[in-house]
Image (cartoon, helix red, strand yellow):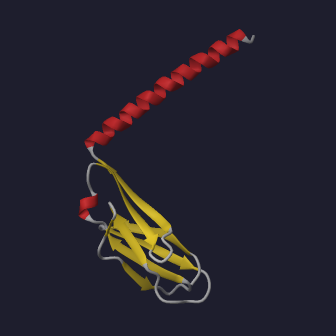
Amino acid sequence: MSELSLTKTRLFDGIWEGALHYEGEPGPAPKIDVTFLGETIDGVAIDTTDTPNTWRLRFPIPKESLADGVQTLLITNQITGKQLDKLSFVAGEALADDLRAEIDLLRAELDMLKRAFRRHCVETM
């Protein structure tokens, strides 16, 4: 089996689904790891499909990954170690404050750039 690629198909009812595509001759089912905070999650399933050179990947979103801040699940090819995709969740009140602070900082920097640009235009006329 050659290089794998992964395309997300849907996230529904706490189950993430994607299509694993490969080129070449069919072989055994690929070995995929899904990890959260370095720990492999349970319930990863790989099924055949009616589409040639395609497997279906499914796994449940672990409830412990739904917490304040940014949480990320990594999907990797177990054989090569290559990261195929990542799934990130953003949640919580603390995050809203962080985003507001970042937007305020960006506004301040934009205002500074506008003033500098206007000053440059006046000086070069």
* Residue drawn at x 34%, y 63% as measured from the top left: 38
State the image coordinates of residue 2 (x, y, percent, origin top left): 59, 80
In the picture, measured across the screen, residue 51 lies left or right of residue 14, that is: right
Residue sitting farthest toward the right: 125
Which quadrant of the figure contains the C terminus? top right
In the picture, measured across the screen, residue 67 lies left or right of residue 87, that is: left
Q: Is residue 84 above or below residue 24?
A: above
Q: Quadrant of residue 4?
A: bottom right
* Residue drawn at x 48%, y 71% as measured from the top left: 81
**How many numbered circles are shown?**
0
Q: Quadrant of residue 105?
A: top left
Q: Is residue 102 above or below residue 122?
A: below
* Residue drawn at x 56%, y 86% as measured from the top left: 52
Q: Is residue 27 above or below residue 4?
A: below
In the picture, measured across the screen, residue 119 lies left or right of residue 66, that is: right
Considering depth in this image, is 111 or 50 the residue closer to the camera?
111
Q: Is residue 28 above or below residue 82?
A: below
State the image coordinates of residue 9 (x, y, percent, origin top left): 45, 70
In the picture, measured across the screen, residue 22 lies left or right of residue 98, that is: right
State the image coordinates of residue 122 (x, y, percent, origin top left): 68, 10
State the image coordinates of residue 1 (x, y, percent, origin top left): 56, 84
